[in-house]
Amino acid sequence: MVDPLRLKVRPDKKEMYLKTILLGDEGVGKTTLRRKRMGTSIKSEIDEERYVKTLGVDASAKKYKVKDRGIVILVYDPSGSKLFRDYVRTVYKNTEGVILMFDVTNRKSFNNVFERIDDYLKYGGRKDPVVYLVGNKIDLKDKRVVSREEGEELAKELSEYLGYEVPYRETSALTGENVREMMRSHVIDLSKRILKKILRVFRSNQVAQEVF
Ligand SMILES: Nc1nc2c(ncn2[C@@H]2O[C@H](COP(=O)(O)OP(=O)(O)OP(=O)(O)O)[C@@H](O)[C@H]2O)c(=O)[nH]1
Ligand SMILES: [Mg+2]
């Protein structure tokens, strides 16, 4: 299990500590999204754009502030490869959120989304995680094969399947387009779901601010 101290994260009593996992096929952009936009990693990483497959599970932490309350989000970033599936399953049970990613230039990755959430639900994930569906690589306009409408339709199907809303977002992990907004919104939804009994701060719209 990832030790938060190794990430230099020291949640104090006022800080909440939540975990979310990026799930999707190999090469959809999970590591790029996490590494470039979500802070420090537990493994030493070279900042390059060359595709280096993730081995096992990596993670980053990012701290947000929602109404004066620090919220530390640990983002698990597993390999999309079947080779590591057993290992990846061991981190499912500790997560409150799931970001289901596909690549809008790769239809197979889109077709495999249901299999990913089923695997999560079957092998130890919580039964009602906060789920976001994310279509990545929207900067590759000429290579796009999955439309926004299809993404929205899939999010609807996932919502029906799970029994609660699954938002759909489109991002470019490479350029950063919409990544920050997607994460902020995911953090707010996680906070609402997990903390609403503890905090009475969600009567109005809240904004999540990055702290580090
Ligand atoms: N054009 C473009 N390329 C991207 C984007 N996101 C990732 N890539 C590229 O796609 C390749 C794979 O990205 P990764 O982030 O390593 O993919 P991954 O999902 O972590 O893959 P695994 O670790 O094997 O499961 C890399 O060459 C990235 O630079 C994007 O939004 N746009
Ligand atoms: Mg990776």
Image (cartoon, helix red, strand yellow):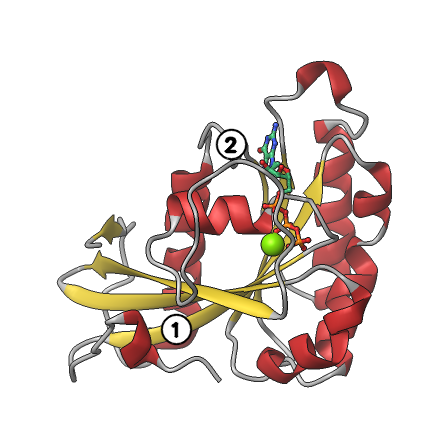
From the viewer's perspective, tell me whether residue 177 is left or right of residue 139. Answer: left
Nearer the N terminus, badge 1 or badge 2? 1
Distance from disc 1 to disc 2, alpha carbons, whole Å, reads 25 Å
Q: Answer above or below: position of 173 versus 54.
A: above
Q: Is residue 51 visible?
A: yes
| Residue under the point 31% across and 76% down | 6
- Using a 10 Å C-alpha cutoff, classify the residue at mark 2 as few (fewer than 14 neighbours), some (14 to 19) or many (20 or more): some
| Label 2 within 8 A of ligand 1 by Cβ | yes
In the depicted view, which residue is nearer to us: 200 or 144?
A: 144
From the viewer's perspective, tell me whether residue 70 is left or right of residue 122. Answer: left
Q: Name the quadrant containing residue 176.
A: top left
Residue 85 in the image, given as x and y percentages of width and height: 75, 73
Q: Which mark is residue 18?
A: 1
Residue 210 in the image, given as x and y percentages of width and height: 24, 50
| Element type at mark 1 | strand
Residue 201 in the image, given as x and y percentages of width and height: 23, 65
Q: Is residue 196 visible?
A: no
Image quarter for ligand 1 equals: top right
| Residue under the point 39% across and 61% down | 41
From the viewer's perspective, tell me whether residue 102 is left or right of residue 106. Answer: left
| Element type at mark 2 | loop
Residue to which mark 2 is pinned: 174
Q: Answer above or below: position of 80 versus 7.
A: above
| Residue under the point 81% across and 26% down | 145
Instruction: Give the residue type at disc 1.
Output: Leu
Instruction: Give the residue type at disc 2.
Output: Leu
